Amino acid sequence: MKLQNPRGMRDLSPEESIFRNQIIGVIKTAFENYGFSPLGTPLIERFEILSAKYAGGEEILKETFKLKDQGKRQLGLRYDLTVPLARYIGMNQQIKLPFKRYQIGTVYRDGPIKLGRAREFIQCDADIIGSASVLADAELLILAARIFERLGLKVKIKLNSRKILDAIMEALDIPEKDKIEFILSLDKLDKIGANGVREDLKKKGIKEYDEIKPLLSTIKTNSPDELKKNVSKLFAKNNKKFENTEYEKGFVDICEILSYLKGIGIKNIEFSGALARGLTYYTGAVFEVFLKNSEVKSSVAGGGRYDEMIGKFLEGKNYYPATGISFGLEPIIKALKIDKKEAKKTVTQVYIIPINALKESLDIAEKLRKENLNVDIAFDKKGVSKGLDYANSLSIPYVIIIGEDELKKNKIKLKDMKTGKERLLNSNDIVKIVENEKKSKDI
């Protein structure tokens, strides 16, 4: 028998798991602060759900782990949390809207193994279903800004709209067959510059439009008003209607979202007219979050408005405007970097060493656990010295020693493992000391 993990999957040590749980705890608390309720869905879905027309698409379906149950039914491991959400909405159409849900869960993709990509990973999603208001989009961006503040990470949020991308292509008369490739090239603007984008379009055989160069320069200014002005001029030049259309609405929506964020003091957001996500998926605002001054260059969160996906997935039975955001746990963990020296090796706060006092030690342990302390107890008679060595190896902050002397005095000996200080106390005093230490040092 070969003792190894499946490719693209790995074990997480207690130190790594504790560190991850702390980060997830910050994200979960923020989700709930903003009124999102938790939703749980199965790891396994019916394959016909995962492969539905408006689910993940052909590329992601190639990476789906497939299996059969004993009844020979076709099943698969979920590859994201959005398709299960759409299925849940369809099965619970009496649900009150808007429905604000979050889900933090493991997903699976049988894709190629490369640096930074695993086959098992955690997604942290928050979605608002049933509201077409741009205030919902703005709230997701505020949520993202606050989460990264709490994590102590400096970020830049980039914002655009699919409607603005459509307006740019309409203004330039980009043929339908070239639209996807045009957007993919435009999306590289920040990385390769205006000349690089023009060269990329040329390689793809997309016509060199005279208006592209000045338009790319305007996009680089990160001003939605300037871009709107230029686009509207091109519409007028080609005798096309711009005012009071969905094209204009894209600019209006983005300016409204920016005003909401700036109104509450969020300054780390910028308009990026070249930003594109999910070419056939998003219908309105799209956004990505990037770290400042970090070796992590990929986005750490992203999302946008997808008003058509759920309705189409449910075969047009209802219209469900929706907007959502997903946080990438792996790049966030990489950015925060677990400090091996400072990393917690255990969640235990108090370790009890009994000396011929097992029953009394169990009683004390239960009393402290009822006060919500994390307590472990030495099961084997290894003596005080070995017990202290064990606690020290796991960086457990406090040790309780209970022996005949302590029982006679009706007291408990508490040892602070950091300072070495010992005190004889009653159990109520111990709870107060550990709780105070927990608040000040997050033990």
Image (cartoon, rainbow, N blue to C red):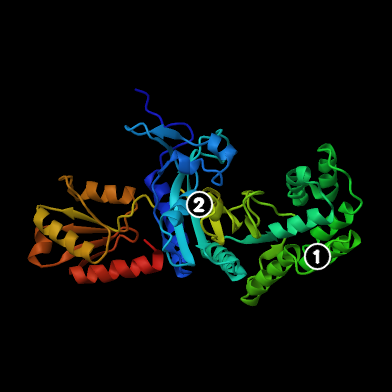
Is label 1 in a helix, a strand or a loop? loop
| Residue 258 image position (x, y, % from top left) | 68, 70
Depth order, front residue of 132/154: 132
Mark 1 or 2: in front is 2
User: Where the N terminus falls, by quadrant?
Assistant: top left
State the residue at coordinates (84%, 42%).
Answer: 206
State the residue at coordinates (73%, 50%).
Answer: 187
Which residue corresponds to mark 2?
Answer: 314
Residue furthest front as drawn? 317
Asked whether, in this view, residue 152 is left or right of residue 41, the answer is right
Q: How far apart are marks 1 and 2 (CA)?
A: 32 Å
Residue furthest top as drawn? 1
User: Where the C terminus falls, by quadrant?
Assistant: bottom left
Above or below, 18 relative to 253: above
Q: Mark 2 Cα within 10 Å, few/some/many (few <14, many 20+)?
A: many
Which residue corresponds to mark 1?
Answer: 242
State the residue at coordinates (53%, 63%).
Answer: 147
| Residue 218 image position (x, y, % from top left) | 83, 60
